Image: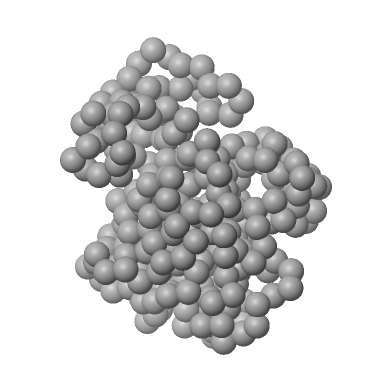
Amino acid sequence: MRLGRVASPDGVAFVSIEGEGSDLAGESSAGSWTAKEIAEHPFGTPTFTGRSWPLADVRLLAPILASKVVCVGKNYAAHAAEMGGPAPEEPVIFMKPSTAIVGPNAPIILPPSSSQVEYEGELAIVIGRPCKDVPAARAKDVILGYTVANDVTARDQQRQDGQWTRAKGYDTFCPLGPWIETSLDPSDLEIVTELDGEVRQRSRTSLLLHDIPKLIEWVSTVMTLLPGDVILTGTPEGVGPVQNGQQVSVTVEGIGTLTNPVAAKR
């Protein structure tokens, strides 16, 4: 099931996105897809209100409103190398505030205080139930599904501050979408980031240093995870700067494409 969150003519709603075709992400195919309204929330077994809209007639929002976004740093060896450090033996985690989340096609706003804002395309995990101290062998039991993320980073401030909260935490610095895929094997998916149509990152989730079960086990020993919480699994090599007027697209195989324009703060 593909779970989304949309602004419809009747308000904001969780939906199941259904239809036929191979490219949900394409504008040309959106008209053949339908957004079916889910009553209340998408956790557990969703129930439907009976209302639906053509996907082309609604606006996709961030598919979930997380209480927290937990991120994993240097989880691809090649990215650790390009950042000038060794690959960590254990997961390195940090957090983004929930206010950093935006959805597809929402602009990434460049803060005037930074001169080096960079994209980081990633696969994201969405948690489906409250959990703590989850063993890796049971990680699948607490996952709602997977979505696409962009861990936008003010790289100059990351270096300057010596810790990552400001650099990772600006409003609009956590695009998520376009929807959550609940039926997906995440172990070997291609991930591609394009800047103005030019490929800048290309890798596979099979190259994660710490796989998804390990990440859920590690994070849940530290903190309780709640339904809707998001874990960003790390970015591959090829990160780079974005400028006002450019457009970033991150595609994860089996999910779709998350596209966001880049804009200067007015």
Residue at image location 37% in from the left, 22% down from the top? 36
Q: How is the image coloured?
A: one colour
- Quarter holding the C terminus? bottom left
Front residue of 250 and 191: 191
136 in relation to 80, above or below:
above
11 in relation to 200, above or below:
above
Q: Is residue 22 left or right of residue 98?
A: left
**Residue extending farthest top:** 50
Residue at image location 58% in from the left, 29% down from the top? 43
The percent coordinates of residue 42 (x first, y second) are 53, 28
Snapshot quadrant of residue 50: top left
168 in relation to 2, above or below:
below
Front residue of 46 and 59: 46
Q: Is residue 147 left or right of residue 80?
A: left
Residue at image location 53% in from the left, 54% down from the top? 188
Residue 23 visible, this orientation? yes
**Residue extending farthest left:** 28
180 in relation to 232, above or below:
above
Residue at image location 32% in from the left, 54% down from the top? 259
Snapshot quadrant of residue 3: top left
The percent coordinates of residue 261 (x first, y second) are 28, 60
The percent coordinates of residue 56 (x first, y second) are 23, 33
Residue 65 visible, this orientation? no
The percent coordinates of residue 196 (x first, y second) are 24, 66
Give the total number of marks visible in the rendering.
0
